[in-house]
Image (tube, grey):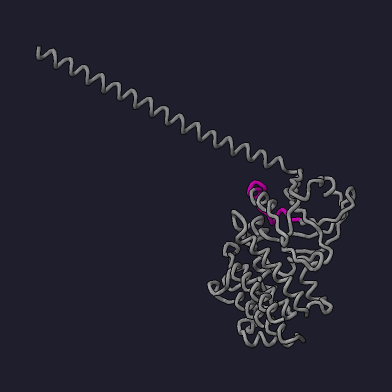
Amino acid sequence: MQARHKLILIVTLSCSFALCIVVALVYLIYVCKRKWCLKNETWDKESNFEVEEVETKGELIKFEGGQDLTSLDILDAPGEVIGKSSYGTLYRANLVTSDSVVVLRFLRPACTRDVQDVMHVVQLLGLIRHPNLVPLCGFYVGSRSEKLLVHPFYRRGNLAQFIKDGNGELHKWRVIYEITVGIAKGLHHLHTGLQKPIIHGNLKSKNIFLGQNRQPFVSDFGIHLLLNTSAAQEMVEDAAVEGYKPPELIKPENASFETDIFNFGVILLELLGDKKPNNNDKQIHDQETRSNAILDNWIMDPVDEENIMKLSQLAIACCSPLPSFRPDIKYICKKLQDIVSCRSESR
């Protein structure tokens, strides 16, 4: 009897053990099959994405303000070169069908990343809208991977040209102040107003356009994200030649909010001093010397003189050789507001 119970117990345990093994094997097969399916599902999604992106060649992707554009309009538009860089060319284009004018930014295929690698950046840039930022209205990819960005045209030209041909307007406090505030607001939106902040990466007076009543529009933000490594490095080297490269910016990947602030400071010094930026000018870091040199260019009442001094000190702080010493864009906007408030009280 005892032997019989032992036999039953052994058989029961053996069956239970066998059942556990079967269940474990079934589960293992299920998990492996699930992983294989997920892997292939991911591959399929990636494959579909690549097919979709390749199919964008020869098509115009439209954003707000570019709904009426067509590929034919863009490609057939008579164009006039209004600017060149190491990575592309800027055209003033007349759209025949709509009798309107746009700016076409042609990016050389040899300078840009593959279309599959930049579409997420293009979609992000196409959604950005702000009163002081140049909007992206359309994006075209040609059969040879040439890329065209479509922007509005601003008839008053860029800030660099305005500084060069100011005709007396440049030495008016109100003009300088409003342009400065507009640039700061555009930069503030890029740095703090988006779900995914954007570093401008190439801020300079040539990349700021003027609209009605000298309203500034910051352009070229995020363009460095579309360029390949060598073209982005050349952009950094161009910035050094033009006087916009902060000391810490060695490679494109070193670009930061602080490098944008440095460039903002250089632009502000251009506005205040009517002087082309130059990183070799040691006076840029000498507040008193630099501020006095700026004031020598101005004939103004005491209130304007005080505010110009404050503005020049802010510009020099932005150009600090140490990134950690530069104010952030929120502080800059607050200081600009404080300056105009003090001026109003003095009146």
Q: Residue at x 66, y 48 (%)?
A: 119
In depth, the one of 315 and 335 nearer the eye is 335
Instruction: Using the rendered view, name the quadrant where residue 60 is placed.
Output: top right
The residue segment tinted magenta is 106-119
Q: In the rendering, at what x and y percent does residue 116 appear? A: 64, 46
Q: Residue at x 63, y 77 (%)?
A: 314
Q: Quadrant of the N terminus?
A: top left
Q: Residue at x 69, y 73 (%)?
A: 267
Residue 82's place in the image compared with 271, above or below, is above
Q: Is residue 95 left or right of residue 158?
A: right
Instruction: Using the rendered view, name the quadrant where residue 6 is placed.
Output: top left
Instruction: Using the rendered view, name the quadrant where residue 201 is placed.
Output: bottom right
Q: Is residue 209 visible?
A: yes
Q: Is residue 249 visible?
A: no
Q: Is residue 36 magenta?
A: no
Task: Tell which residue pokes out farthest to the left in this image.
Answer: 2
Q: Residue at x 67, y 83 (%)?
A: 309
Q: Is residue 138 left or right of residue 255?
A: right
Residue 47's place in the image compared with 314, above or below, is above
In depth, the one of 134 and 150 nearer the eye is 134
Q: Is residue 136 left or right of residue 101?
A: left
Q: In the rendering, at what x and y percent does residue 293 appear? A: 69, 87
Q: In the rendering, at what x and y percent does residue 112 appear? A: 68, 54
The number of numbered badges drawn on the structure is 0
Q: Quadrant of the C terminus?
A: bottom right
Q: In the rendering, at what x and y percent does residue 26 appear? A: 38, 25
